[in-house]
Amino acid sequence: MRLYNSLTHTKDEFVTHFPGVVTMYTCGPTVYHFAHIGNLRTYIMEDVLEKYLRFSGYQVRRAMNITDVGHLTSDADTGEDKMLKGAKREHKTVMEIAAFYTDAFFRDCGKLRIGIPGTVVPATSYIPQFIEMISVLLEKGYAYEANGNVYFDTSKLKEYYVFNKQNEEDLAVGVREGVEEDLSKRNKCDFVLWFTKSKFEDQELKWDSPWGVGYPGWHIECSAISVNTLGEYLDLHCGGIDNAFPHHTNEIAQSEAYLGHPWCRQWFHVLHLNTNDGKMSKSKGEFLTVDLLEKKGYDPLVYRFFCLLSHYRKALVFSWEGLDNAKVSYDKLVSRIAGWSRDGKPNLAEADPYLAAFRDAMDNDLNTAMAITALFDVAKAKVDDATRRWLVGQMDSVLSLGLLEAADRVSTAADKDGAEAAPAAEKDAFDLEIEQAIAERAAAKKARDFARADEIRAALAAKGVTLTDTPQGTTYTRN
Ligand code: AMP
Ligand code: ZN
């Protein structure tokens, strides 16, 4: 497989440190508000990447952080602390906000069939690991204390701007609008590892540390969580393109200074989803969420399909018209599949060239648009229905568009309209577990215990189960 690597700026042959095993780290959400569908574009593409690596035979060990403490990088930050801002907006504590929006994030992931990484670590649960890493950076002379804070000293590195060799001035100034100068820093790119003093004195969450009571800077969380959960050699690090600088640049600085050797060799960055009037942002008035898509009558999987129609390394403009076009195409595919017989055995030899076309597309820097063309080619293929269904199942184990289930729903509905109803699909133990959880959730809702009801929904979402509430009751789909 060839994958574009932001470090080398070329499509490199994908390699792993240990044969057959991929260690993969994902920058998780900052849980002060709902994720917008731009954030979710990044998570969809990362999910497809993970599923394709598994499809290709790798074992994937994947970890993700949840940014539930601060989001500050320097005392010059003029923006508010996002978590604190969320807490003030909703008259809740920071931890309540974090719990609520973490659940909301997992719920959205469930609806979009984004698998949850095997290891998920809230930053607040890793404070001792952050302190340990910062202590080593101080010992090794890569960090210094000034005015109550601990800073990373970027002048100690051979190379700091690892992703782009752009003009240093542009980068340093252009990172964020309205950046003031932090007079405690020795170099303008230095960043805070641990705060004990900042102008955000009203921080709710603080911890004791060798440098006084305070809280970590943003970048340290991903370095420490990654090294502690996935080990010293990381194969693949993912995130949205905005994270390349300064966040990932600073992660590399910290991790390599701490470890004393190169850390992560492949960096996967997803370009942004924008609207016609520019960048999508949580701080803009009406921002686009999965809930909003559903309210407008779209199946979230149509949005996933919309994302997969474009390459992850191209900025994507969202429009309702674009989503409608994706829906027409998705529905067409589903109704073609619904017309195929569900009987018979696949002919794997005949299936082979179609699966090879799918692999070729995905092996070429995760070209999901070409992979979807390969999927449509199956619909036109001169092979029997059982082979076609098998091929769709194979491809959809990576793309996760729920195609066979959607098609079965369509054909079951058609059968009901017709003479005789199709036999119900056989239930397994997991179906029974889900049904039990749904009943428990209904009881919680009846008792107006909405927190418990949300908890049950989130727990199911984490297992890849999406619930849909209808006037007739709650239905579900499995990942
Ligand atoms: P945040 O919750 O702000 O920490 O962001 C979560 C993820 O979404 C990160 O990987 C970001 O790089 C990514 N991201 C932020 N904005 C967008 C966007 N408009 N399109 C795609 N990904 C984004
Ligand atoms: Zn990160």
Image (cartoon, rainbow, N blue to C red):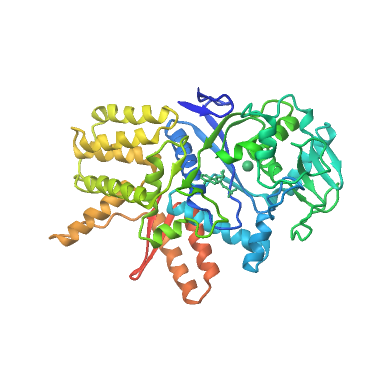
Q: Is residue 454 left or right of residue 123?
A: left
Residue sitting nearer the eye, 163 or 358: 163
In the rendered image of this protein, does residue 436 appear above or below residue 138? Answer: below
Where residue 129 appears, x then y in whole percent?
74, 44
Q: Quadrant of the N terminus?
A: top left
| Residue visible at 72% across and 35% down in the picture | 254
Where residue 262 appears, x then y in whole percent?
67, 26
Q: How many callouts does the rendering have?
A: 0
In the rendered image of this protein, does residue 44 appear above or below residue 429? Answer: above
- Residue 463 seen in render: no
Q: Is residue 203 left or right of residue 91?
A: right
Where residue 58 appears, x then y in whole percent?
48, 31
Where residue 405 appears, x then y in whole percent?
31, 50
| Residue visible at 37% across and 55% down in the picture | 477
| Residue visible at 28% across and 26% down in the picture | 353
| Residue visible at 81% across and 40% down in the picture | 185
In the rendered image of this protein, does residue 54 appear above or below residue 465? Answer: above
Q: Is residue 122 left or right of residue 373?
A: right
Which quarter of the figure has residue 391? top left
Image quarter where ligand 2 lies = top right
